[in-house]
Amino acid sequence: MLTQTNKSTQEIESLMATIGQNAKAASGPLSIASAQQKNDALAAMSDAVLKNIDVILSANELDMKNGLEANLSPAMLDRLKLDKERIEAIAEGIQSISKLADPIGEVIAQWDRPNGLNIERVRTPLGVIGVIYESRPNVTADAGALCLKAGNAVILRGGSDSVNSSRAIHACLVSGLKQAGLPEHAIQLVPTTDRAAVGELLKGLGGCVDVIVPRGGKSLVGRVQTEARVPVFAHLEGICHIYVDGSADLQMAVDVVTNAKMRRTGICGSAETLLVDRQVAASHLIPILKSLKEKGCEIRATEEICIAYPDAVLAKEEDWATEYLDAIISVKIVDGISGALAHIQKHSSAHTEAVIAEDEHVVARFFNEVDSAILLHNASTQFADGGEFGMGAEIGIATGKMHARGPVGVEQLTSFKYRVHGTGQIRT
């Protein structure tokens, strides 16, 4: 069991420096490991997870007990909780990553110059990735497996809430590395919950860390973006909108909106704001709100909606900019696609937005004018997930515009270099 330890600043610095050096040393062999060797490691990791279900469950029970005593919210407890099905899904996720094409060495582009030079752009690993996350223990497996597949070493720093679950899963990953003959320091878990360890990781560990990926709440991501001295792939919030257009099919709108909000309320792809076209407010709004209410969702809405639907409560201005991660949704009637676009532009966090519509011109405007990482048409925002995109899994959703955007999967965890082939050319 991992516990909070009272280490001095010097001890934390020394611990993290060693972890960084070990990761850097492991990144070399990983960068040239064969696809088969990496896949063998992933298969062994998946098997180890399945063989240790009881061990992982016991560790998770301890985390859940601690979480209840710490008064974690229901949404946070849902993120933290593991059961047999979720652990089997973790193992399946590792297996699915092993089946992806190995990106390393892939020739992305190739062309010839008039002087006879042949130029290739080729995928390479990023090197060492630091992943900082909170209460989701499955991120331990997803991040470890994805980084390995892309030829990167990874330093995992999970939250104190999930520390025992993460350690149990991490032991399975290390077992797989050893079985495949890969460096065991290729996937390291920071063995302390001391916040000072995060600070050291954000400094880059003396040049050993190439990129940081935070996955968690606004305060965590905000700290990472403020303090990091290395590049960051991140999203600050998932304020996801779903717009029901006047051309939307009623039953589709009810089903998709309900799923987008209530399938799992604690994930970043959960819809937080519902916008309904005034043209169909009379026919579509109440059936959608009733469906949400039946699932236990609290409705926060404008005054005109509260009058039409007394079970709603009056929304405050801050509701339009709130990521609830809970069974709460803010609702507003807008004047068509233009009204929806104006609201989204003002309040979006550039994560995920969806439109329910049959009018192709509305869909075209939505896709062209909304500048978020993921846009969906007639589908739930809960599909904003690397696994659902066929990426096997993801480390997180990046909402920036540099290098990685949207689900951060295997390809997004690579860089590239140029290989130039000549026949003795010299430049005059």
Image (cartoon, rainbow, N blue to C red):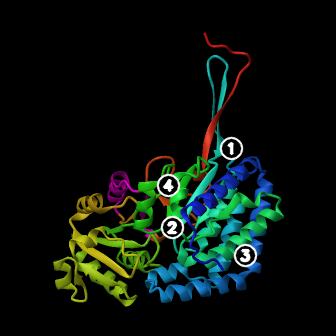
Q: Amino acid at mark 3?
A: Val
Q: From the viewer's perspective, is 418 left or right of 261?
A: right
Q: Amino acid at mark 4?
A: Phe
Q: Residue furthest top?
A: 428
Q: Which residue is mark 4?
A: 233
Instruction: Determine whether the residue tagged by mark 3 lies in a helix, strand or loop.
Output: helix
Q: From the viewer's perspective, is 269 left or right of 64?
A: left
Residue 8 colored in magenta in the image: no
Instruction: Determine whether the residue tagged by mark 4 lies in a helix, strand or loop.
Output: loop
Marked residue nearer the N-terminal end (4 or 1)? 1
Q: From the viewer's perspective, is 293 left or right of 279?
A: right
Q: Which residue is mark 3?
A: 49
Neighbor class of circle 3 (other Cα within 10 Å; few <14, some 14-19, many 20+) is many
Q: Position of residue 96 (x, y in %)?
A: 68, 65
Neighbor class of circle 1 (other Cα within 10 Å; few <14, some 14-19, many 20+) is some
Q: Which residue is mark 2?
A: 195
Work out whether 354 lies above or below 296: above
Q: Which residue is mark 1?
A: 106
Q: Position of residue 226 (x, y in %)?
A: 41, 55
